[in-house]
Image (tube, rainbow, N blue to C red):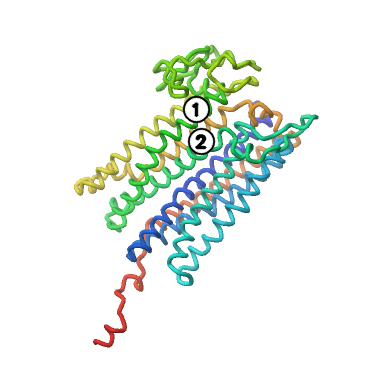
Amino acid sequence: MELLTDVAFLSRLQFALTVIFHFLFVPLSIGLGLFVAVSETRYYRSKDPKDKAATKFWAKLFTTTFIIGVATGITMEFSFGTNWANYSRFVGDIFGAPLAAEALLAFFLESVFLGIVLFAREKISAKLYLVSAWLVWIGSALSALWILIANSWMQTPAGYAVVPDGSKAEITDFWAAALNPSTVARYLHTVDSLLILGSFVVIAVGAYYLLRKKNIDFGKKFLKMGLVVGSITVVAMLPFAHMQAVVVAEEQPAKLAAMEGQWEDGPADMAFFGWVDEANGTTTALTLPGLTSWLATGDANAIYPGLNTVENGPVDLSAYASKVDSYPGGIPPVNLTFQAYHIMIILWGAMILWLIFGWLVLKKETLQKNKFLLYLLVFAPLVPFIAIQAGWMVAEIGRQPWVVYGLLLTDDAISYAVSSVEILITIVLFVVFYLILFVGWLRIVLKQIKVGPIVEEADAAPKVTAAAEGGE
């Protein structure tokens, strides 16, 4: 019951709930936006009315998801000035720039061209419409870039100076701050995961049509589209995840140690699964010795600090493989970070299995009647979605106790002018309201999927030329 009066805990819980809900729709919109553009590219080349219907279908799903994503994102921004006022004061001069750029350079781009995609097909040229479809997706990808620049700066601050009284950080080099050590790796890793989720949704819709024996042609086409993009992006996750892991190893030694449950200094092992006993400082796991050190440096004997070393900091890390000069101290919740990290990895392996199932179903007509495999594919999006949430848990929980790594503690970022009762009330209201939003969104989306792509009669009818009419 003490947690229910802990302002810091409740503020973090409230923000976590809003982020989780918001990040249900952001990955879907960015992932599905690509398929709007791909479908329109197919139509531009083929002039097949079915490809045009597919563009309209994916655009409807994208728009429905995009709207909810925007609304839930606004809630998060308001919380910076209410529950996290001290954080806003400290990073406002830096954090505000990418948020403003996201609104001006990405959100408006995405919104304007989405309007063209929804309402202006018959009013503009086919080429301009195609460009608009791609700009919608590019706008969503740019939006993710600016948000991830802000988030990455919190993980690996750069291009800043703290004012003499320590009250805030000011930007001294915009490009150093924007391209801080984790920006590129984090962006590639994150956007690739969003495209994986989008591809698995397309696979699921295709499998649904095969299961229902409805819209069979669309089902096979969607299944193939999703499998092609899914296969490319799942394989691409290997180098992108490696880049991200190297950054963590070089910049955030406590997070790396928590991810593998490493308590003592030494080569970092790779654990497959296990359990961390935080009370006794031990980890029981099946591991490959030195594999994480080898992946990070090419040397299986590269030494990394254990949790016992970095817990109390500051620690001089010059004797270790990490590129950080010193660590400011503190360790995250170890078992939670450890489990989330390994859930993410296990689910990446599961995605490969799901893709194999999908290719088998697509290639073999007999398997297209196998309800078990089709149901597996229908529920396939749950796999990357859970993996994405687990990955964000590693990123955000793994940097604790810091909200801005090495500069601002999470407990110092809270606005203690807000009472625990007020936060509890908002949590209850958020849960109720978000459940209503989710049910409404889900009903609309499922209805759109059930109806499926609609080939309009005017598009399906053969074009009669003036010469043909004269011949008649």
- Residue at which label 1 appears: 246
User: In the rendered view, would you say 337 is above or below 44?
Assistant: above
x and y, in percent, of residue 233 in the image: 39, 41
The residue indicated by pointer 2 is: 185
Residues at circles 2 and 1 in contact by the CB criterion of under 8 Å: yes
Q: Residue 349 placed where, x, y %?
A: 36, 32
Q: Residues within 10 Å of mark 2 (few under 14, many from 20)?
A: some
Residue drawn where x is 74% and y is 38% of the image:
89
Relative vertical location of residue 266 with respect to residue 432 in this rendering, above or below: above
In the image, residue 393 sits, relative to residue 270, either above or below, namely: below
Quarter of the rendering containing residue 109: bottom right
Instruction: Decide which of 27, 124 is in the foreground and name it.
Output: 124
**Sequence order check, earlier mark of 2 and 1:** 2
Secondary-structure class at tag 1: helix
Residue 49 location (% of width, % of height): 34, 66
Total labels: the figure holds 2
